[in-house]
Image (cartoon, helix red, strand yellow):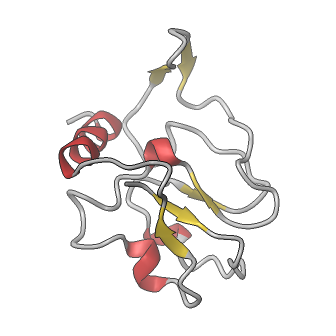
Amino acid sequence: MAIMITDECINCGACEPECPNTAIYEGGVEWTWGGGTALKQVTLEDGSVIDATAKQAPISDEFYYIVTAKCTECNGFHEEPQCAAVCPVDCCVDDPDHRETEEELLAKKAFLHGE
């Protein structure tokens, strides 16, 4: 499953630089598919194709957030999710709404990084 940041986040920012996929963003900040990845364009579920540098709406305006579609739980990079390892208030937790197998997470890593 992907990792999510709960509303207990204190906005310390410790998690953001730890993410190998650049899937973590400060509240209110727009995100991109291309940031921290090898992606040049992305085909969305509806079949439309967007430029990977196109700004996407923030998922949260209040606290740091993780873009689920970019989160691999650090599979292929580290033994454990680094955001959870460094979070001082333990608010980086498993997202029960986005369960993925290790194989799915590794496939997502390969997609994001052009492997």
Image quadrant where residue 39 sits: top left
Residue at horizontal 24 percent and vertical 48 percent from the top: 101
Quick one: which residue is furthest to the top in this view?
Answer: 47
Could you tell me residue 21's position as x and y percent? 41, 53
Residue at horizontal 18 percent and vertical 45 percent from the top: 103
Front-lying residue, 66 or 49: 66
Residue at horizontal 68 percent and vertical 36 percent from the top: 56
Q: Is residue 110 left or right of residue 81?
A: left
Residue at horizontal 55 percent and vertical 90 percent from the top: 88
Q: Quadrant of the C terminus?
A: top left
Q: Is residue 32 left or right of residue 56?
A: left
Could you tell me residue 31's position as x and y percent? 64, 44
Q: Is residue 36 left or right of residue 32?
A: left
Image quadrant where residue 48 sits: top right
Could you tell me residue 64's position as x and y percent? 67, 65
Q: Is residue 59 positioned above or below 25 on the image?
A: above
Could you tell me residue 85's position as x and y percent? 40, 82
Front-lying residue, 95 or 114: 95
Front-lying residue, 24 or 8: 8
| Number of residue marks | 0
Q: Is residue 77 positioned above or below 102 on the image?
A: below
Q: Is residue 76 positioned above or below 54 on the image?
A: below
Q: Quadrant of the N terminus?
A: bottom left
Q: Is residue 67 positioned above or below 112 on the image?
A: below
Quick one: which residue is furthest to the front in this view?
Answer: 96
